[in-house]
Image (cartoon, grey):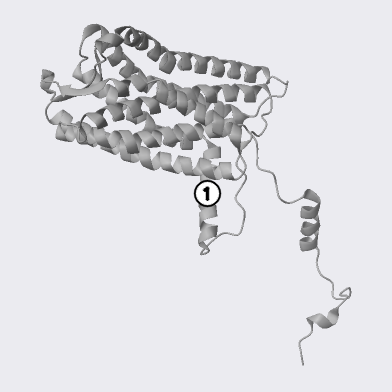
Amino acid sequence: MNSSQWRWPAGGVEATVVLPSVLGGLGAAGAAGNLLLVAVLVYEVRRGKRSAANALLLNVGAADLLLALGCLPPRVAAYARRAWPGGGVLCRADGWLLHGCLVAKSLSWAALSHARYRHHLRSPAKRPAWSLAGLLAAVWGAALLLPLPLLLFGRLEEGGARGRLFDCAFRPPAGAAGFIDVFGKVYPLAAYVAPAAFTWACYGRALRLRERGGGGGKRLGRPSHQVTRTLLGLSLLFQATWLPQWLAWLWERHRGGPPPALLALAEVLLFLDAACNPAVFAATSGECRAGLRGLCGGLRCRGGRGASREPPQPMRDLDGEAAPENVLPDVEHFWKDRRNAAPREESDPVPWEHQCDP
């Protein structure tokens, strides 16, 4: 197998000015949006909404944030300078980290689809913190191990073809040809095809359960169905934006160097998904907007100036559980009756307390 994990997509002003500018804008939008999304989800988890769905969506946001802050800046600098700023070490590390984040997103979307399917089966229970931490650790462990050969066998070499100066090429040694051949077939299946098929199957079964009224015979509400449809759309968006990268992968293995236009399209779409996720989720999810209002209200209360004394409205998490109310119904009715009752002067038991001092 003789392929490249990163190539110059084109020469001229398109690659040195236009493409870095587009990627820089996507990186700034992705960093800001995902930082806000992660802050909202961390705030909700700290308030007690510890569910697998919330934790996995937090994992997706963290992966997108790492893509925008860790993987994109070296690529923008490499396009603008026509050379890798850190040499072969940064070239290999960037390709490995990029694929690790993408695999983490792929596995997280698959696990999130299973969590939504279980939610449609029955009411979910709150999971302990150690269980959620173990789930996230397993996702990231698999995501960083699968593309490890890209880190071990990557090499920066001079390109020369189609105006490219340097390629971050995948050059395994001759003795590892059998392993690399297996890796070239197994890696796309494990990183892309199998998680995508599992995701589609889980969401399809969840939507069918919703139409039948749920696994326990109780029909789920419209907000829960809207969350499921939103997550399905975001997972499909991720798989669609990663598909050109796999087409370039297969093109490289079977037909030589891919066309520059395909490489540029694949590069832009990878980071477009990271920039769009927070905006799409905030626009379609009332729960996300409620969590953002709660986070802003909490920050104002901590500031102490201009803070609203009314508590934020409870936000339902992605599994449909609402925060418990702090006021008992009987006590609330008692105080309501006390406020509505008009005071009578004749029935004042301590009239001297309302008199002015001489």
Q: Residue at x 58, y 31 (%)?
A: 52
Q: Position of residue 279 (x, y in %)?
A: 42, 36
Q: Position of residue 319 (x, y in %)?
A: 61, 31
- Provide the secondary structure element on which disc 1 rests: helix
Q: Residue at x 46, y 40 (%)?
A: 37
> Badge 1 local density, few (<14 within 10 Å), some, or many (20+)?
many
Q: Is 300 left or right of 334, judged from the image as shown?
A: left
Q: Position of residue 74 (x, y in %)?
A: 25, 35
Residue 28 vs residue 78, the one in the foreground: 78
In which quadrant of the rendered view does residue 34 lie? top left
Q: Is residue 224 above or below residue 350?
A: above
Q: Quadrant of the C terminus?
A: bottom right
Count up the numbered dots. Answer: 1
Residue 227 vs residue 86, the one in the foreground: 86
Q: Is residue 310 above or below residue 253?
A: below
| Residue type at the position of mark 1 | Leu
